[in-house]
Image (cartoon, rainbow, N blue to C red):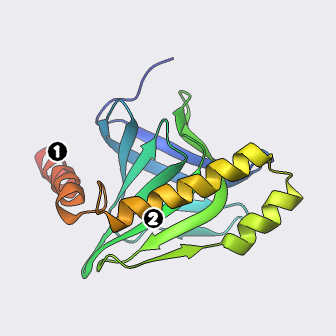
């Protein structure tokens, strides 16, 4: 199987614990492949939800799909700062077709001023019962949410402006070099 490399375009697919497709991104541009993470940009990419709703991403988002962590982080560059949407999810894999992971409902939303909200705790509890999440998966998910919150409060990468801004600048430099 061929590995991803900088400059590749790739699909992103998120599933649920029961194997159902949850959400897909039509294209993501690989801007870094690290030992621990795929870093991609989605910019005006079509997103298709499991209920067939479709929407177009509005701004560049630097996405960190970790290979060994139970979450992924989407940082959205907006006029008034960087917003983060963090999904508790299985480690991401690239299988030659797409970057894939399993979404486990819990989310952390981070605002430009560093404040955050934990989202979808009720959905997590509901799916724990409906899809029979094993106890070890439930614990891993809660620990991953706690790790994300700790990273946010400690301003660990990528939760600081300069870290994400370096990737944003790299993305825009690459676009201008192509044209």
Please rate how many residues cluster around mark 2, counting C-alpha atoms within 10 Å: few if below 14, some from 14 to 19, many from 20. Answer: some
- Assign a secondary structure to mark 2: helix
Q: Position of residue 89 (x, y in %)?
A: 59, 50
- Earlier-in-chain disc, 2 versus 1: 2
Please rate how many residues cluster around mark 1, counting C-alpha atoms within 10 Å: few if below 14, some from 14 to 19, many from 20. Answer: few
Q: Is residue 33 visible?
A: yes
Total marks in image: 2
Please, is residue 136 above or below residue 169 in the view? above
Please, is residue 3 above or below residue 101 in the view? above
- Assign a secondary structure to mark 1: helix
Taking depth in this image into account, of 123 and 21 the one nearest to the observer is 123
Q: Which residue is mark 2?
A: 149
Q: Residue at x 48, y 68 (%)?
A: 56
Q: Residue at x 85, y 54 (%)?
A: 131
Left or right: 71 with respect to 40? right
Q: Position of residue 171 (x, y in %)?
A: 22, 51
Q: Residue at x 22, y 57 (%)?
A: 168
Q: Residue at x 73, y 44 (%)?
A: 136
Left or right: 35 with respect to 121? left
Taking depth in this image into account, of 80 and 111 the one nearest to the observer is 111
Q: Position of residue 28 (x, y in %)?
A: 41, 48
Please, is residue 111 above or below residue 47 in the view? below
Q: Is residue 24 visible?
A: no
Q: Which residue is mark 1?
A: 178
Q: State how far apart marks 2 and 1 are (Cα).
A: 38 Å
Q: Which mark is residue 49?
A: none
Q: Position of residue 101 (x, y in %)?
A: 60, 44
């Amino acid at each position: 199987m061929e590995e991803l490399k900088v400059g590749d375009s790739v699909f992103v697919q998120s599933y649920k614990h029961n194997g159902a497709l949850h959400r897909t991104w039509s294209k993501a541009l690989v801007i870094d492949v690290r030992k621990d993470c795929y870093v991609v940009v989605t910019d005006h990419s079509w997103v298709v939800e499991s209920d067939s709703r479709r929407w177009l991403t509005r701004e560049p988002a630097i996405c960190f799909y970790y290979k060994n962590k139970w979450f992924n982080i989407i940082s959205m560059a907006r006029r008034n700062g960087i917003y983060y949407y963090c999904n508790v999810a299985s480690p991401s894999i690239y299988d030659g077709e797409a970057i894939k992971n399993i979404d486990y409902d819990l989310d952390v939303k981070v605002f430009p001023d560093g404040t955050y909200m934990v989202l979808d705790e009720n959905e997590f509890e509901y799916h724990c019962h409906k899809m029979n999440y094993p106890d070890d998966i439930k614990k891993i998910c809660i620990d991953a949410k706690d790790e994300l919150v700790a990273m946010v409060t400690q301003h660990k990468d990528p939760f600081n402006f300069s870290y994400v801004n370096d990737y944003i600048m790299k993305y825009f430099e690459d676009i201008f070099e192509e044209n």
